[in-house]
C-alpha cells in the first residue's frame, strides 16, 4: 500500500524519522512544529532545527473514547497520548505499543499507521518504548 | 467608608443549569430579570450592560426583549474566562463612564458531549485533530497526571474531589447533577482518560447568570447587604504554562495564568489567601480543583489530599470550596460559568446560600476561572460596611 505522511512539515526527515522544530537564535527556545517567531522571548530570529529522536515520557494518558471528527481512524481502539521530554523541548505525540506508561521511561521516535485514506496508508509520528541514549 | 470608586454586587440571579431546549435568549432573559428583581430595579435603571456567551447569539441584542433604553451594551467572548471578563468589563465601565448601575449577564446552551474544537482556530495543522489529539479531556488528564507525579499526590484525591462536588450539589436547587457519588464509585467508574473517570469531568450544558453592580454609596441605598467587588484581575499565559492544545511545552519552571491572576487579585484587594472563608475554583475536572487550590495560593502544593480528608473544603471546614457543586455538578455553560461562581459567593457572604450555607457569617470570598487558550480571571469579594 502506498504511504503518505500526515503532514510533511512536521518532519526534518522521515527515514529515519526526525521531527522538525524551530530554534530561537536569541533565547535558544525550541518549539514544535516549527514557527516563524519565538513565543518565549517574542523574538523573530528563528531557524528550523531537527529535534532529538529519543526522550522520556513526561506525562501520559490513554484515550478511552473515540474523539469526534476530524479524528480519522480505521476502527477505534483506546490509544495513548503523551508528552515526551526530548531535552530542549517537550513534544506531544502518540505513545504506541501499550496503553499503560510510567513517567520517566525512555521512548524513541517512530512512524505509526494512523488511518487508511482511499487505499493510501497515512502515517504519523509516535513514540514507542526504547532505550535511553 | 465606601468611596465612589467602590463597586458592589447588589443583585444576583441564576437559572437552573443542565439541558435546555429553548432559545439561548430565554435563558439570558430569565437571569437578567431575576437579577433586576433581586436588586429591586427595572431595566430602565441600568446604565451600562455587558453580556458574555460563546454561542452564536448576540448578547447585545437582548435589548430587543429587555427594552430599547439606549444604554451601551458590550459583548465579550473569552472562552472559559468569559464570565470573569464580563464582570471586569462592567466594573471598569462603571468607573470609567461615570455610570451608577451596571448589569452583567453570561449564558450558553451547548450541545451534548466534549467540546469539539477546530485545529485551525488554534493555529494548528489538521494533523492534530486527525490524529485524535485535539481533545480537551486528554489535556486535563495529561496535566493532572504530571501534577500528581510531581507533588507525590495520591490519585485517590481525584475521587475525594468528585465526592465533595456531588455532595454539595445534592443540596443545591440550581445544580445539574445532584446525585451523590462515593469515592469508590468515582474511582471505579469508566475511565475517560487515565487517571480521570466519567465522574471526574464536567460536561458542557446550558445556563445563565446575571449580576447587578452599583457604585458605593448608591449600592447601600439599593441593597441591605451589598457585596463589595474588592478586586477583579485577568491574566494571560506566560512562558512555562501548560495549556490545552499545546503541541509542545517548554522544559523548566511551570507558570500559570491562574497563579498570576490570583496573586494580582489578592494584591489589589489587600487581602491574603489565608483570609478567604469561601472559594470557588475552576474544576473542569477533579484534577483542576486540586491544582487550582494550590495555584491560587489557598493551599500548599501537595497538601490538598489532607485537606479533603480533614473536611477542610466542606461547608463547616476551614476553607469551603465550590459550595454549589462547582463545574463538576453544574456543568459548563461557558459564558455563565464564571458568573455562577460569583453568584454563589455573593449568596454565601449575604447569608442566603441556595444550598449549604457556610456558617459563622463569612466576610471574604474568592472566585477563580481558567480556560483556553491560557487565561484566568479571579475576584475577591468582601462584606465591608458602609
Ligand atoms: Zn526566543
Image (cartoon, coloured by chain):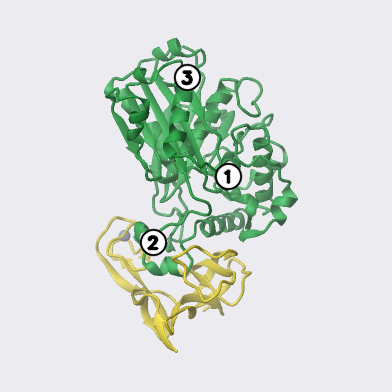
Q: Residue B119 carries which label?
A: 2
Within 10 Å of disc 1 (Cα), the crowding (few <14, some 14-19, many 20+) is many
Q: Is residue B326 visible?
A: yes
Q: Is mark 3 on a helix, strand or loop?
A: helix
Q: How many neighbours does mark 3 have within 10 angstroms: few (below 14), some (14-19), or many (20 or more)?
A: some
In terms of sequence position, does the residue under pointer 3 or pointer 2 come before the other? 3
Task: Using the numbered discs, state the Cα–Cα distance from disc 1 to disc 3 in whole angstroms.
Answer: 33 Å
Name which quarter of the figure residue B196 lies in: bottom right
Disc 2 sits on a residue from what chain?
A: B
Nearer-N-terminus badge (1/3): 3
Quadrant of the picture in which ligand 1 is shown: bottom left
Chain at numbered mark 1: B
Q: Where is residue B60 in the image (x, y as percent from the top left)?
A: 33, 34
Q: Quadrant of the N terminus of chain B?
A: top left
Residue B289: numbered disc: 1
- Helix, strand or loop at mark 1: helix
Residue B258 visible: no
**Which color was chain A given?**
yellow
Query: Residues at marks 3 and 2, common chain?
Result: yes
Separation (CA) of disc 3 from disc 2: 43 Å
Between tags 1 and 2, which lies in front? 2
Rendered location of residue B23, percent (x, y): 44, 39
Farthest top residue in view? B221
| Residue farthest front in this picture | B22
Image x and y of residue B157, in percent = 67, 49
Give the residue displayed 37% in from the left and 45% down from the top. Answer: B56
Give me the disc on residue B182: none
Q: What element carries label 2?
A: helix
Say if B173 sits above or below A119 in the image. Answer: above
Amino acid at each position: 500500500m502506498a504511504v503518505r505522511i500526515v503532514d510533511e512539515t512536521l518532519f526534518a526527515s522521515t527515514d529515519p524519522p526526525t521531527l522538525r522544530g524551530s530554534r530561537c537564535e536569541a533565547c535558544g527556545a525550541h518549539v514544535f512544529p516549527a514557527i516563524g517567531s519565538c513565543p518565549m522571548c517574542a523574538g523573530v530570529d528563528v531557524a528550523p532545527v531537527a529535534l532529538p529522536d529519543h526522550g522520556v515520557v513526561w506525562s501520559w494518558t490513554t484515550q478511552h473514547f473515540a474523539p469526534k471528527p476530524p479524528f480519522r481512524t480505521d476502527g477505534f481502539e483506546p490509544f495513548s497520548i503523551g508528552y515526551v521530554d526530548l531535552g530542549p523541548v517537550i513534544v506531544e505525540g502518540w505513545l504506541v505499543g501499550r496503553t499503560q506508561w510510567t513517567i520517566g521511561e525512555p521512548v524513541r521516535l517512530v512512524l505509526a499507521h494512523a488511518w487508511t485514506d482511499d487505499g493510501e496508508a497515512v502515517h504519523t509520528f509516535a513514540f514507542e518504548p526504547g532505550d535511553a541514549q | 467608608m465606601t468611596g465612589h470608586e467602590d463597586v458592589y454586587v447588589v443583585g444576583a440571579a441564576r437559572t437552573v443549569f443542565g439541558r435546555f431546549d429553548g432559545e439561548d435568549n430565554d435563558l439570558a432573559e430569565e437571569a437578567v430579570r431575576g437579577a433586576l428583581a433581586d436588586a429591586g430595579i427595572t431595566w430602565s435603571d441600568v446604565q451600562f450592560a455587558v453580556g458574555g456567551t460563546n454561542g452564536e447569539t448576540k448578547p447585545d441584542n437582548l435589548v430587543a426583549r429587555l427594552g430599547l433604553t439606549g444604554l451601551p451594551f458590550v459583548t465579550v467572548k473569552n472562552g472559559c474566562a468569559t464570565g470573569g471578563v464580563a464582570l471586569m468589563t462592567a466594573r471598569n465601565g462603571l468607573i470609567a463612564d461615570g455610570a451608577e448601575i451596571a448589569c452583567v449577564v453570561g449564558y450558553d446552551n451547548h450541545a451534548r458531549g466534549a467540546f469539539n474544537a477546530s485545529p485551525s482556530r488554534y493555529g494548528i495543522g489538521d494533523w492534530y485533530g486527525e490524529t485524535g489529539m485535539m481533545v480537551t479531556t486528554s489535556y486535563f488528564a495529561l496535566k493532572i497526571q504530571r501534577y500528581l507525579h510531581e507533588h507525590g499526590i495520591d490519585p485517590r484525591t481525584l475521587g475525594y474531589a468528585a465526592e465533595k462536588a456531588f455532595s454539595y450539589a445534592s443540596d443545591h436547587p440550581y445544580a445539574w447533577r445532584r446525585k451523590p457519588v462515593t469515592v469508590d464509585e468515582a474511582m471505579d467508574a469508566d475511565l475517560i482518560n487515565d487517571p480521570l473517570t466519567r465522574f471526574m469531568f464536567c460536561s458542557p450544558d446550558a445556563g445563565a447568570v446575571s449580576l447587578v453592580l452599583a457604585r458605593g454609596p448608591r449600592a447601600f441605598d439599593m441593597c441591605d447587604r451589598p457585596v463589595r467587588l474588592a478586586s477583579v484581575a485577568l491574566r494571560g499565559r506566560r512562558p512555562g504554562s501548560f495549556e490545552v492544545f499545546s503541541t509542545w511545552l517548554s522544559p523548566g519552571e511551570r507558570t500559570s495564568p491562574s497563579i498570576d491572576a490570583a496573586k494580582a487579585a489578592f494584591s489589589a484587594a489587600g487581602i491574603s489567601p489565608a483570609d478567604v472563608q469561601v472559594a470557588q475554583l475552576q474544576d473542569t475536572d477533579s484534577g483542576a480543583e486540586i491544582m487550582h487550590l494550590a495555584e491560587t495560593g489557598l493551599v500548599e502544593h501537595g497538601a490538598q489530599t489532607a485537606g479533603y480528608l480533614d473536611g477542610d473544603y466542606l461547608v463547616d471546614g476551614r476553607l469551603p470550596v465550590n459550595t454549589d457543586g462547582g463545574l463538576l455538578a453544574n456543568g459548563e455553560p461557558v459564558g455563565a460559568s464564571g458568573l455562577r461562581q460569583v453568584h454563589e459567593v455573593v449568596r454565601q457572604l449575604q447569608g442566603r446560600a441556595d444550598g449549604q450555607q457556610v456558617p459563622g457569617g463569612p466576610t471574604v470570598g474568592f472566585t477563580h476561572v481558567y480556560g483556553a487558550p491560557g487565561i484566568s480571571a479571579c475576584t475577591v469579594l468582601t462584606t465591608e460596611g458602609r
